Amino acid sequence: MTETPTLATWFRTTVETQGVASRSTLYTLVGLKTCRIVIMIAGFWLFAHMMHSLVVLAHAPSMADWIGLSVALLLAWLLQGEANRRTLDAKTQLLQDLEVRFARHLAIGQLAMVSQQSPYYWQSLWLHHIPALANWRYDYQVQQYVAVLAPTIALAGLSMVNWLIGLSLLITLPIVPLFMVLVGKGAAAQQRKHFTALTRLGSLFTDRLKALPLLATYRAHDSELALLKQASDDLNDRTMSVVGVAFLSNTVLDFFSTVAVALVAVFIGFTLLGEFAVGPVINLHHGLWLLLTAPLLFSELKALGQYYHQKAEAESAQSSLGHWVEAIPNEALDAALNKARVFDEPQQFTLRHEQPLISATNLVLRPGDKVAVSGPSGSGKTILLQALAGQYQAGYSLPCRVALLTQQPVLLPMSVRANLEYQQAHTTSALWQVLAQVELDDWGRTLPQQLDTPLHETPAISGGQAQRLALARVLLSEAPVWLLDEPTAHLPTEQHSQISELIQRLSEQKTVLWVSHKPLPTAWFTRYWQVKEGEVTVQ
Amino acid sequence: MMAFATVLLAVVHGLAGLAILIVSSWFIAACAIAAPGFNYMLPAVVIRALALLRIGSGYAHMWVGHKHLLGLTARLRISLFARLHSQKINSRGEEVEALATHTEAIAALWVGWVSQQASAVMMLLVSCISLWWLHVPLGGWAIALAVIWLSVIVILCVLGLTYAVEIASQEAKFRTQSDAQLSSAPIWHLKSGDSFLQALPKATSLWRSNLLLQQRVLQAQWVFQGGAWLLLLASLLGLVHFSTTTELAEPLLLIVPMLLLSAGDWLGRSFHSQPALNKAVQGHKVLNALPASSLATLPLPTSTGSLVLTGFGSVNVPEQAISAELPERGLVWVTGPSGKGKSQLLQAIAGLEASRGSRAYAGQVLSPGLVSGWLYLEQQPLVMAATLKHNLCLGQSFRHTELEHALVTVGLSYLSEPGEWLGPGGRQLSGGERKRLNIARALLHGGPVWLVDEPFEGLDSEAASLIMSVLQTSAKDRLVVIASHVIPEHTRPALTLRL
């Protein structure tokens, strides 16, 4: 990828596929909002006519006008309500669709995907970025269309009633695209500069909050306070001088809309008085209607400016989400989630993946093999295991279920039973049996509530015990292939040998790939693979 | 002052906009019937003057409002920081990060919410008073409009605040749940099929509450719009049926219908400012309930001596009870598998964490707290957004040669520019560089006790042996306690504590 696509292009190619975020929903919303504006213009006509009767003709407005106005306002009101309702529905639907898509990527990428970023990063995707896309799609994008359609319709109407005012506003109309740019660029620049300044100031501040113990240790609180004051003042002064210019773009729009109304009013008034004799004859009916309709040339543009922050938020969502909201076909998901429970066919395979790099050519793996995987740290051993488990799209993954055992055993903050039954329910006797296999049954019987003791309430569990518990979970998974990623790395030598022996004993019937930096009895293994700079070779 | 200027300018901006519309429509009507002696020049001038007033006050509101926002944000942050003297915040890094947003949200209350509400209130108030003052026909309907606006906005604010509480608690719940779910990613593969997809974090209920708030804001605006138009239709119906010719042909008749017709436009923004109120209230709550704990500071002990721990341990590690005598000078290793609380023990000795048992130094039992001159060098040292010199000096002053010497000693001689900015927007240091910078700082500041947490992790072997020799040299003048799960060869520790 040489250049990042614009937000709209990215959204169209990545998100807008397979019925998600359909264009028709977008156009329906635009249609509803535009209809409302047309109806309002008609309502203004009737309203102006009623005022004309009252003030100029000095008789009560007709009931027909009143009924017409009632119908117009009612329709406009209902359309607005409907547009509100549909906007929220559309946002809800899009959020759901995006969540499903993202979940599918998580389902396939699993550990390989999650470990690329901090939990905070992932949470931000859910909390901020996905909602930002929904808001941008159904507020900002809808308003973009309305901001073009509304002035066009209003101008057409204005020209029909009074060609002179229509013409003079038309002359200012080329300014409208200019406004779009002004609103866009101006607000963008404002947003960016303002944002950068606030972010810097924010990080200056949070940095020192995090460093409170450090500052207390060095007795440096007061000097930092002085620095913070100085930096705030400096940065605020600089920001104001930048922002002062950026605000002008908003003011330009305000200027044109206000001046247009004021000038139209003065022009109409003077024409009514007969001071001006240019253009068509005007009465109060037409004059008031022109006055009410002219602001529509600008009001929707102004509304677009108010949504501008959504665009910036959606752009940051685009860069964070990337391809994680692309559609994944059902077959790929099924294949990843429902794998065979047996491994009985010898495999010969080739792996290719860039970033992270892993490649292997014609490796052979037979059921029951015990493979020692070695290589310097950072060479790609973990990536090899994750690729075989199907967590990277590397052109091949093992055709059966696998059980990965990592350096740090994962213990859920739940009971021993819940930890063991992570995958599926088992009978209590089966659980005790498996605990006995990993030599944890004695420990289990000392627990206050036996299997139902919550793990975080037990006296601190040692690293070795934790890894045994994880091993018990692997045994229960009945996966025919075990992928061991340095399960003893953090254990003292004595425990390393005990647990290694245990693993060897329990995995007699399994196919095992074992990554270890610590010594293991070489006689046990049937194959030796070496990973070097992402390249897997047979030793 | 600035806050009031912000609000005042917003009020002027709003009033000028409304006045243009009203005066313009009245002007057109007055021109249409052109009563004899009608001075048309004055209103025409007034309209143009109002336009200029609106444009000017609009710009000034933005300018003053943002200046106020920036200034208030800075003041809030500085006072919070000052309040936290000799304290520490017991929350995660991300929650501390969020304080920047919270202080900003509190400061934005004036620009974001008060200004909008004040301008709505003033527009209604001024309308009602001037309608009554000028005996404008149908003036009573404006009071009804004000009542509708007030009821809708009050209901919206009350509802909005309850939703905000709900959203905050949902967010906290989502964070805890997803933390647990994400940290179990290494075992996700054990699950299969639908049970797996169900175990993934979901933000649906949080989104639902967020959308519900959006919905209420839109509904409030919609209901108010409906109410205003209903008043308009009712007042017009009255004119259709019950008007007498005497009150007709009066340009002032136009004013109230115009007000009612456009009420949604000039009061609409007051509803959309609701989220700003929520964020400010939420920010206040977070700041007030900030989980900070005090760090008592103890003076520098008058004499140096050995450090005697008796049944000593961090309160965070239940089984920790160390009894040992650490010499006045020399290296002491703390080793043991991870999870045994090596780091916790060091922080407890330093006085950064609460402890059990007793620690005595040079024969004196120390009360809990940070001892002046005892430096805890953390595993992942913080480099603050500031210059290199500032990071090294931390409030004290050192000569240029001293700084240079310290940097050369730890192998950071390439950081030769003391004025260089570190952190975001400047030079980003790697984990290993941060560790070395931290040791350089300790070399400058000295002190009788150093507690060094995992100094070799993330360093290549060359850098690790350099740091080892620096620590060994430093240990000639002081007690250096090193917590590490690897002990480099050829070290001669005075004592090794195995946890």
Image (cartoon, grey):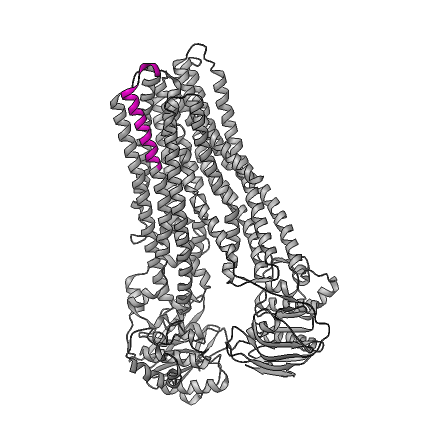
**Coordinates of residue B223 in the picture (x, y in percent):** 33, 38
**Rendered view: A158 above or below B298:** above
Left or right side of A383 for A196: right
**Coordinates of residue A378 in the picture (x, y in percent):** 49, 73
Q: Can residue B10 be seen by looking at this rendering? A: yes
**Coordinates of residue A294 in the picture (x, y in percent):** 40, 27
The quarter in which the C terminus of chain A is drawn is bottom left
Magenta span covers which residues?
B224-248
Q: Is residue B242 magenta?
A: yes
Q: Which residue is at the far bottom?
A: A523
Left or right side of A536 for B208: left
The quarter in which the N terminus of chain A is drawn is bottom left
The image quadrant that residue B328 belongs to is bottom right
**Rendered view: B323 above or below B80:** below
Left or right side of B433 for A512: left
The image quadrant that residue A64 belongs to is top left
Left or right side of B69 for A20: left
Q: Provide the major secondary structure of the magenta segment.
A: helix
